[in-house]
Amino acid sequence: MLIFADMKQIVRYNSGFMALVALLAVIWVTYTLMYLLTPYFGDDWGYLSVHRTSTGLDGLYPLHEFWLADARHWLHSNGRMANYLASFCLGVFPKWLIDVILGSAACAGAALIVRIGGLWRTDGYGSMAVIIVAVYAMLFPWWDMMFTIDFALNYPFALAVILAATYMFGRMKSADGKAPLMTSAVIIVGVVAGCMHESASLPVLAGVGVWLWFHRDDNGLSTMQRRMLWAFAAGTALATLSPGILFRAAGSEAWRVPDDNPWILVVKSAPITLIVAVAFICSLICSRRMRRMLPRIAASPSIVWGVAAIVALGSVAAGGIVGRSGWFSQAYALIFMCRWIRMSELRLPRAVTVTAAAVAWIVTVAQSIATSVTAVEFGRRMEAIDEAYLESADGVVFADDIDYLTSPWWTLQRIDHRTQDMTMERENIAGYFHREHLPVILPRAATSIDFSTLHTAKFNSGAVITTRKPEGDSCLSVTVIPFSRAGREFYLIMPRRRAAWGER
């Protein structure tokens, strides 16, 4: 009977871990496909043109002057390593290679949350690990252009790098620092991780500072850990204190209008952090056992992630952007929750956790696959539009308008497509291809129109092509795009697009 009991325990242990690995594998495959199927979009075109155009390495800066491009970016925009990587990778690497790296990073971020949270291969917590990965895959703001290269480098990739660095930090407790090569590697990793994104590294540094304060008499850091920590702090300072970030924090970008007031921004962008915080506070109020455990939690590495999650809310409130601003805070909150539950040994009935994990697994897999399948048709459509633009003498393309930002519903708005109200993107596209005319997508029904005699044409979509430029209040509810056709000037007038989920 004892043998059968042991076998039952092994099967239960392995089944939970196998479900976790299978879910991570699906995320890796489907998210990699999403990156492969998502064309250059938004800021990608700007960073793409830093070092090259469609004719080769003839962008704004020669490749050997990458340091000059990065220095100017540090002065005028921000000091994030993620953006330096964006211009370099887009200039040097083929898109498919970048996409595979980003898909792997998206998967690694989920795996590292579980690993640092203490749920990796932990008996009795397999279902919780699956649920945590599902929360990351389903409830994080992937809809906020996270399948574009620049945004992916700034958020999913930056998170994976910082979590990998902290995991590496924890594994060097006995490293004495006598190996020069290892020291160099540790310093490079620390600086790069700290410089990835100030909203990610500064909260972690604050959390580590609080943790060290609790261990100020004997923090027990090895020589190598100290070197890595100083390197991480230096990278964080380099990113946080860049003039571009300081000017932005001072409100110098007058064109940027906050999506909402700070409190609403926090609620919309970091709900997971708020839920974890409320649950933890309620446990302290309602449970004497939890209050007795509080000093032990505060003295453990758990405090790093709890403090980081709260400090990261500052950038959410100050950033003015719904969505991506809460990425790091929510990830750190999940790690804290995992460690807190492990330390308190909280457990729900197995039937409840297994059922919840199974539902989460099925929903996440179904949504990921369905979105990837939908993105195949989307990729073909965008490829046809790009080819038609390159063949067009005046930049005009005739194509059906499909609003992937708001439908189909099951994609959760993760498919990003070219919206004509993004004038800067259209300018960057024309510059990249050395074209005089910006791309303009007209309704397919306009193909048969004689533009040499046209004055006004209306379409079922609500779009209007006219020779008269709208003025005054009439411009507030529409997007106006000028273009030339048959030697004449026209205006494409379209209703303002519906706000995507999460936008104000």
Image (cartoon, grey):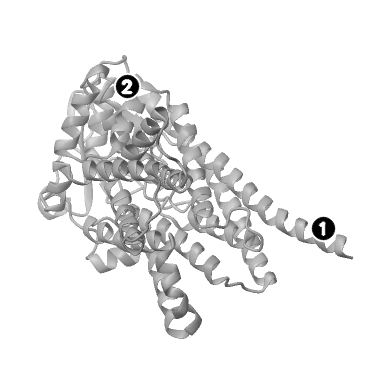
Read off the residue under disc 1. Answer: 7
In the displayed structure image, the side of residue 25 where residue 466 appears, left or right: left
Residue at disc 1, secondary structure: helix
The residue drawn where x is 46% and y is 79% is 292
Read off the residue under disc 2. Answer: 392
- Which one is nearer the viewer's eye here, 444 or 303? 303
The image shows residue 52, relative to residue 334, as above or below, that is above
From the top left corner, tell me how far across and down residue 211 is, in percent.
Answer: 36, 60
Residue at disc 2, secondary structure: loop
Please state, as top left, top right, bottom left or bottom right, where the N terminus lies in the image.
bottom right
From the top left corner, tell me how far across and down residue 138 is, in percent.
Answer: 50, 56
Mark 1 residue type: Met
The residue drawn where x is 32% and y is 15% is 56
- Contact? badges 1 and 2 (CB < 8 Å): no
Mark 2 residue type: Ser
Packing grade of label 1 (10 A; few <14, some 14-19, many >=20) is: few
